[in-house]
């Protein structure tokens, strides 16, 4: 998965998890609240993976550009 796809999936999981967590609170379901919180954390991790991939890609592109410029 690319960096953008990771970030989009991550944000979607964060939103879905937040909704599930709050719905669990509203209906008094500890299980749903915990599942929502875990999904939210999963989303946050996916976003960070996407950001890291983008940073690595940008760094590699800068190095490649510098090498090509010197050739």
Image: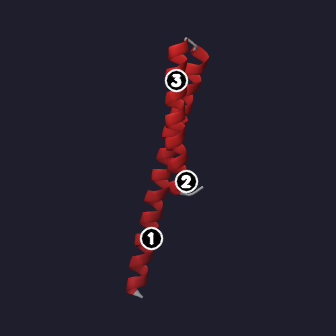
Q: Is mark 2 on a helix, strand or loop?
A: helix
Quote the CA–CA distance across marks 1 and 3: 40 Å
Looking at the image, residue 28 lies above or below residue 15: above
Quote the CA–CA distance across marks 1 and 2: 19 Å
Instruction: Point out the tag, 3 or 2, that comes first from the N-terminus.
Output: 2
Residue for point 46% across, 60% down: 56
- On the picture, is 45 further left or further right than 67? right
- Residue 33 bears which disc, if any? none
> Which of these two is toward me, 21 or 57?
21
Q: Is mark 1 on a helix, strand or loop?
A: helix
Residue 40 visible at all: yes
Instruction: Point out the tag, 1 or 2, that comes first from the N-terminus.
Output: 2
Quote the CA–CA distance across marks 3 and 2: 24 Å
> Which of these two is toward me, 43 or 70?
43
Place residue 39 in its image quadrant. top right
Quadrant in which the N terminus is drawn: bottom right
Instruction: Point out the tag, 1 or 3, that comes first from the N-terminus.
Output: 3
Return the x and y of residue 47 as percentages of the image width and height: 48, 45
Q: Do the residues labelled 3 and 2 touch (CB within 8 Å)?
A: no
Q: Is mark 3 on a helix, strand or loop?
A: helix
The residue indicated by pointer 2 is 5
Looking at the image, residue 47 lies above or below residue 28: below
The residue indicated by pointer 3 is 21
Return the x and y of residue 67 as percentages of the image width and height: 42, 80
Quadrant in which the C terminus is drawn: bottom left
Looking at the image, residue 69 lies above or below residue 9: below
Residue for point 46% across, 52% down: 52
* Numbered disc total: 3
The residue indicated by pointer 1 is 61
Q: Which of marks 1 and 2 is in front?
A: 2
Looking at the image, residue 4 lies above or below residue 9: below
Say few, some or many: other residues with alpha carbon within 10 Å of mark 1 (under 14 / 14 to 19 / 20 or more). Answer: few
């Amino acid at each position: 998965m690319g960096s953008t796809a990771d970030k989009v999936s991550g944000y979607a999981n964060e939103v879905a998890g937040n909704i599930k967590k709050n719905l669990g609170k509203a209906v008094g379901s500890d299980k749903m609240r915990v599942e929502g919180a875990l999904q939210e954390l999963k989303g946050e991790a996916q976003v960070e993976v996407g950001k890291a991939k983008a940073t690595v890609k940008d760094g590699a592109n800068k190095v490649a550009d510098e090498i090509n410029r010197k050739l």
